[in-house]
Amino acid sequence: MSDPVYRVIEVVGTSEESVSKAIDNAIARAASTLRHLGWFEVAQVRGSIEDGKAKRYQVTVKVGFTLE
Amino acid sequence: MSDPVYRVIEVVGTSEESVSKAIDNAIARAASTLRHLGWFEVAQVRGSIEDGKAKRYQVTVKVGFTLE
Amino acid sequence: MSDPVYRVIEVVGTSEESVSKAIDNAIARAASTLRHLGWFEVAQVRGSIEDGKAKRYQVTVKVGFTLE
Amino acid sequence: MSDPVYRVIEVVGTSEESVSKAIDNAIARAASTLRHLGWFEVAQVRGSIEDGKAKRYQVTVKVGFTLE
Amino acid sequence: MSDPVYRVIEVVGTSEESVSKAIDNAIARAASTLRHLGWFEVAQVRGSIEDGKAKRYQVTVKVGFTLE
Amino acid sequence: MSDPVYRVIEVVGTSEESVSKAIDNAIARAASTLRHLGWFEVAQVRGSIEDGKAKRYQVTVKVGFTLE
Amino acid sequence: MSDPVYRVIEVVGTSEESVSKAIDNAIARAASTLRHLGWFEVAQVRGSIEDGKAKRYQVTVKVGFTLE
Amino acid sequence: MSDPVYRVIEVVGTSEESVSKAIDNAIARAASTLRHLGWFEVAQVRGSIEDGKAKRYQVTVKVGFTLE
Amino acid sequence: MSDPVYRVIEVVGTSEESVSKAIDNAIARAASTLRHLGWFEVAQVRGSIEDGKAKRYQVTVKVGFTLE
Amino acid sequence: MSDPVYRVIEVVGTSEESVSKAIDNAIARAASTLRHLGWFEVAQVRGSIEDGKAKRYQVTVKVGFTLE
Amino acid sequence: MSDPVYRVIEVVGTSEESVSKAIDNAIARAASTLRHLGWFEVAQVRGSIEDGKAKRYQVTVKVGFTLE
Amino acid sequence: MSDPVYRVIEVVGTSEESVSKAIDNAIARAASTLRHLGWFEVAQVRGSIEDGKAKRYQVTVKVGFTLE
């Protein structure tokens, strides 16, 4: 059997709730069009501010998946 | 109308509860003296330990705001 | 009295629940064999994916403690 | 309505004229096959030299776009 | 005479024209409220995209000035 | 003729034999679905350990190719 | 009582004597207008050269202080 | 069953033969006193030179293992 | 025929006009004493400020050339 | 004879006197429990401030030693 | 006797065979015009691709040597 | 008059006394063969250890000078 090869893509998930939800959104979106997602890594956490409060978290996530 | 210009400052929010609360505290404090806050970016997450547990989260946040 | 000296070690805590729980696990495990833990710093947040969802968070934490 | 999710890809635009033209070329090329481009970030500026002069600028640009 | 001390602040200039104009705007805005600006350093070049073209350059500039 | 534009993608090749074979696998896999591959750059070398030995090398490679 | 919040500013101290004196100058100057300074971190050490000798050390120091 | 926790240590393996052999030596040495080694990551590749040739490769490897 | 080997040197070009002109100056100066210049990479863009305006751009450029 | 293998640990030395003394303290403490220390590298210089003055230098030092 | 001083230069070795051969070529070329080479450090590994295969490895190596 | 152009070289000064002396040695050595040295920047501070003490500081310094 051949050696596994993976691809890594960069996705930015967002959420008004939390950093975790933003990560979840990024992964869920990637999973809607790609199969065999294997791991993720958080590259950056930022967000918008409105009325002196964090309004929307924007989390850049690298997602790795197996190439068939 | 002239081109917008922003300033970015570095604030460390802390919280005994969670990383999110520390971020909120940093932004809220900045908002108490500055107007037109627009975005933030997490630069570092650290904290103190007491009795073998995370005691207080210290989150360094860069905060951007419009210069009028 | 002599000047304090610290050591810093790198621990990866994991959790299926949240990033915070993974940090807590890393610190708790370090505390089970080391005394005088003083601070921590998050170095990396990553995790495994299963069925299109974050399955297990893996958080690399640097932990500092006083050398007696 | 669901939370927006973005993807970020890396494109290298080139130009014999200027760094700006190389950036424009990278964005224009990305726009020819992708919709909803939202932002870019310059990651690297380099180029080839011929006859003791900059011959062609090669600018690596990260381009973010909304995933529908 | 005492040794000079400087402060460094972070400003984001923007322009629809060019990266250079964005830098100029950042410096001009800083100069409108601060005296003795001495040097700058470009920290990041990014921008928004509209209709498949760079719409507005956003250049993060560190600006140093003498503290009197 | 128009200015060439390239895209850069991130691929992780693996091999039980060597780092070089892992790089080759990454490039070969990319070449199986993409044309005009032009260059690569090694971003990270890691691997799994079994029985006290390197079991499988995992090499993250950035691969650049011409966009037609 | 509310959670402490800090601010971090960047100051460049200089000295013809030594790196340490340049750090001291940066902190002393910050202390002349700000209260509750708590910690510093050296970000860069550079300097000018005259007649083949280090003429003036320029040390960039990040200084953190409590926001009241 | 509790969540796994890992530790990461830094080891420098050396070899007069090759970079690969230096990595192997680092892992083998770690394996001689630690159990449950799981993964490694190459942090730096350097070496000494003698008579105009690479004499000994020195490869810094981060090694992760399960804490029981 | 033997494998090509290159050297990379660091040059700082300056210009009162523009960043591009500063890059050109760096390359032209390198070309006045070195042959076979092949490529360049921008490492840093900074400059001096006078009267609230960018006075002189200082661009650090890495220049690669073939060793014969 | 087998190829030497080294380990690298991270130690934070502190001193109210100077950065040098803090480095010395870190090395001396490491030497009190480890043999065959070979080299060190300064990773970070920071410190606490009291009464507008550097109170205690905290220098993070990586220390390498031979594994027997 | 005076304290040794070293210089560090950046050389890119290439090879169609392997990364190791590219490193060797870089060092051998440096050794042909410089004496007292002492150590090297790999800064970057990249290469060209032809027909879906690594064609030529290009390894950037920093080489240190004693100044007499 | 033409725009000044500078070159930057990397030198490692060493000293058994102190970090400062190592910097001075690097600059003095560079000054013995180069004219118009203008500035330096410390890139790395490391050293050898003997008998549980810092034996010789090795400080990597980037030195900039005007090209005539």
Image: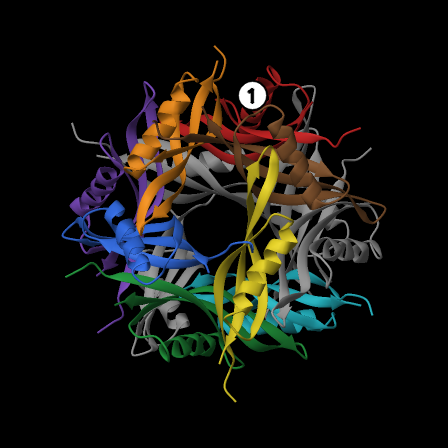
Chain colours: B yellow, C brown, D cyan, E green, G blue, H red, J orange, L purple
Residue positioned 63% across, 25% down in the render: C32
Q: Secondary structure at mark 1?
A: helix
User: Of C68 and H68, which appears nearest the observer?
Assistant: C68
Q: Nearer the viewer, residue B17 or L24?
A: B17
The reply, left or right, for residue D33 in relation to residue B68 is: right
Q: Nearest the camera: E22 or L64?
A: E22
Indicate whether G62 appears above or below H46: below
Mark 1 — residue?
Answer: H25
Answer yes or no: is residue D29 visible: yes
Name the spot of residue H4 as percent of width and height, x first.
72, 30
Residue that appears at 56% across and 18% down: H29
- How far across and down, in percent of the image, does residue G47 sit? 26, 53
Which quadrant holds residue J16?
top left
Q: Which residue sits furthest bottom?
A: B1
Q: Residue at x 68, y 44 (%)?
A: C20
Tell whether D32 sits left or right of D39: right
